[in-house]
Amino acid sequence: MKQMQIPKRLTSALVNSLTAGVVPRVGLEHIAVGRKPEVASILQDMDNIGEGGAAFRLVTGRYGSGKSFLLQMIRNYAMDREFVVADADLSPERRLVGTKGQGLATYRELMMHLSSRTRPDGGALEPMLQKWIAALQQEQMQDTGLRPGDPKLHEAVELRIYAVTNEMQNLVHGFDFAKVLAAYWSGYKLGDDDRKAAALRWLRGEFGTKTEARQELGVGVIIDDDNWYDYMKLWAEFSVRIGYKGLLLFIDEGVNLYKITNSISRQSNYEKLLTMFNDTMQGKAQYLGIYLGGTPQFVEDERRGLFSYDALRSRLMDGRYSSGTRRTYTSPILRLDMLSHEEILILLQKLRDIHAMHAGYEPQLRDEQLITFMQAAVGRLGAAELLTTREVVRDFMDVLHMLHQHEELTFEELLGEREQQYAAQGAAKKSEAADELDDFLAEFEL
């Protein structure tokens, strides 16, 4: 296999993240295997979104099956294609709606992680606005010959800014959104940092009361739990008006909605999800993609999952001709199976080479040894039902670290020791279960 050339900062990120069992933020293209139909389908979504369409997808799979990996990889692809992206994990404190501001908390998380190609790690809100204003100034200087600092240049730029914001005033909440953008420009033009900061706070959803917003910005509304999603639609429209292709939202850990114990609260969140689905499917949202990750149980449980909400169930369930072994990758649900054995082998080969490159040694493990490792992992008791790609990767990284740090140790010795331990643990568990059964029978004198 030809040796890859990957920068040290990427190999560091990959090795550290995979050792810890978490999805790397960068460098995913170097370890991606499989998922070609799913990726191709989402890239087609991006083409549609860039033309003014919208998309909504549920990415489902067992824990460790690669949902977060796929979402992160698509996020990186989107930034490379000049989309603005934002991501957030749902939690008990972050939902779609809630009585204690959980919906607004999700909005704030998304805005904190707002990213672009030049700001891939979040915090892109102010750089986006500054880039837009700088581009308008540059454009006006080229068209009119005006110099920086000329009052006429400020007037010309201001006219262009109001042209963009006026277009947005026809949208829901567009008037107030435009007014805050104009306030940011006013602060930028006058060197008023307080006014700029107030505009950014409002756009990030950080104003607590309408009174405060009125005093500081002259705006009578604030972003709150009820309207935050409407502002996401505005951000999608605005992103396109300032030179991007659209906005993609990546929301993971959807299972936290399934875990809401209060049925009314859970249904309220599903209702919000239905609104988002309908908007994107019916053309009420433009330049917006929403990708939600969750477990199959979160979607398909008819007692508490999305399928418990009839309006969602009827929209999300497969048609009668696409169920079974053949799937369509254009449906709202993208179901991720575990990687095949062949794909896992390719992944192990990539990890072997990346670890060697990172630590500065020649790869030692042969492909036959990788197959032996994979067979050992798959062959353990219950592995067919419980084994995940995440576990295989984490265990393999452990093997690579051990062999590199203990040069006297061979692969066969290490694997043999671990398999003996697993066998002993399995025997101990069986013995413990047998003892418990004996105690139970003795107690009832059976």
Image (spheres, rainbow, N blue to C red):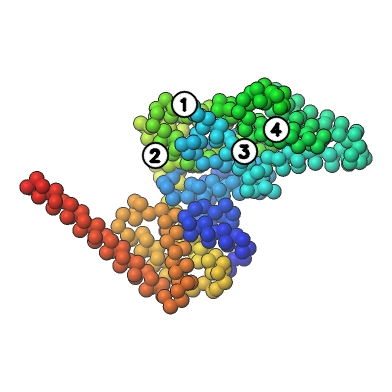
Helix, strand or loop for disc 1: helix
Comes first in the chain, label 2 or label 1 = 1
Is tag 4's residue or tag 3's residue first in the polypeptide sequence? 3
Q: Nearer the viewer, mark 4 or mark 3?
A: 4
- Disc on res. 198: 4
Q: Nearer the viewer, mark 1 or mark 4?
A: 4
Q: Which mark is residue 111?
A: 3
Q: Is residue 65 above or below residue 241?
A: below
The amino acid at mark 4 is Ala
Front residue of 230 and 212: 212
Q: In this orientation, does residue 323 appear?
A: no
The image quarter in which residue 53 lies:
top right
Residue at x 62%, y 32% (from the top left corner): 205
Determine the CA span between mark 3 and mark 1. Answer: 23 Å
Q: Select label 3 or label 1 by which is in front.
A: 3
Lower position in the chain sequence, tag 1 or tag 4: 4
Q: Marks 2 and 3: which is nearer the front?
A: 3
